[in-house]
Image (cartoon, rainbow, N blue to C red):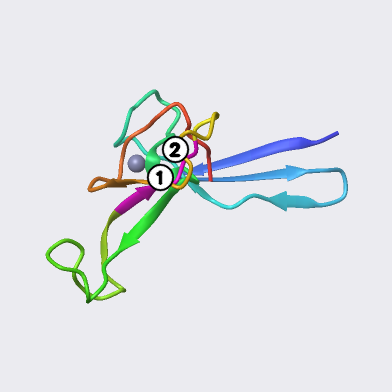
Amino acid sequence: MAIKHAVTNGNFSNESTWNGDNLISTPMRKKCDKGYNDGSGNCCCNCKYQKKAMCHPKNGNIGKGSINKQMGWICMTEFEDRSNKDEYMFFDFEHGFCELYMSR
Ligand SMILES: [Zn+2]
């Protein structure tokens, strides 16, 4: 029998599962109340499809800078019918939500 265990400390939640022999920890997942707030803490910023968009020195006006400098975020979600295959959305904001949310 698996026993689920969750410890919430401020904005962070640390979940672990006892499988009878070992305690299996899952990575800490940051909860957020800055996006679409349904009380779950789910937000683009803790969705596995959100990635960082980084600058490059050879860019023109948009995204010009060090490769260590972040210019925004990318959403790499894929629609069920794959109609957006190889198309990723750029965002200049970090927090939001959509129906394709997937926890990290
Ligand atoms: Zn957020």
Q: What's the magenta region? A: 73-78
Residue drawn at 25 percent across, 76 percent down: 66
Q: Residues within 10 Å of mark 1 (few under 14, many from 20)?
A: few
Disc 2 target residue: 84
Query: Is the CB atom of the residue marked by disc 1 within 8 angstroms of ligand 1's nearest atom?
Result: no
Residue 52: mark in rendering: none
Residue 78 appearing in the image: yes
Q: Quadrant of residue 55?
A: bottom left
Disc 1 target residue: 87
Residue 10 appearing in the image: no
Residue drawn at 54 percent across, 51 percent down: 28
Q: Is residue 5 left or right of residue 88?
A: right
Is-magenta flag for residue 27? no
- Mark 1: amino acid: Glu
Q: In terms of image quarters, where does ligand 1 lie?
A: top left
Q: Is residue 60 left or right of residue 46?
A: left
Residue 2 in the image: state x and y as whole percent: 80, 36
Residue drawn at 53 percent across, 46 percent down: 104
- Mark 2: amino acid: Asn
Q: Is residue 81 left or right of residue 50?
A: right
Disc 2 and disc 1: Cα gap in Å? 5 Å
* In the image, farthest residue toward the left: 61
Residue 1 in the image: state x and y as whole percent: 86, 33
Residue 86 in the image: state x and y as whole percent: 46, 47
Q: Is residue 29 above or below residue 68?
A: above
Residue 89 in the image: state x and y as whole percent: 34, 44
Tag 1 secondary structure: loop
Residue drawn at 40 percent across, 45 percent down: 87
Tell me whether the residue at label 2 lies in contact with that at label 1, contact meaning CB atoms closer than 8 angstroms. yes
Tag 2 secondary structure: loop
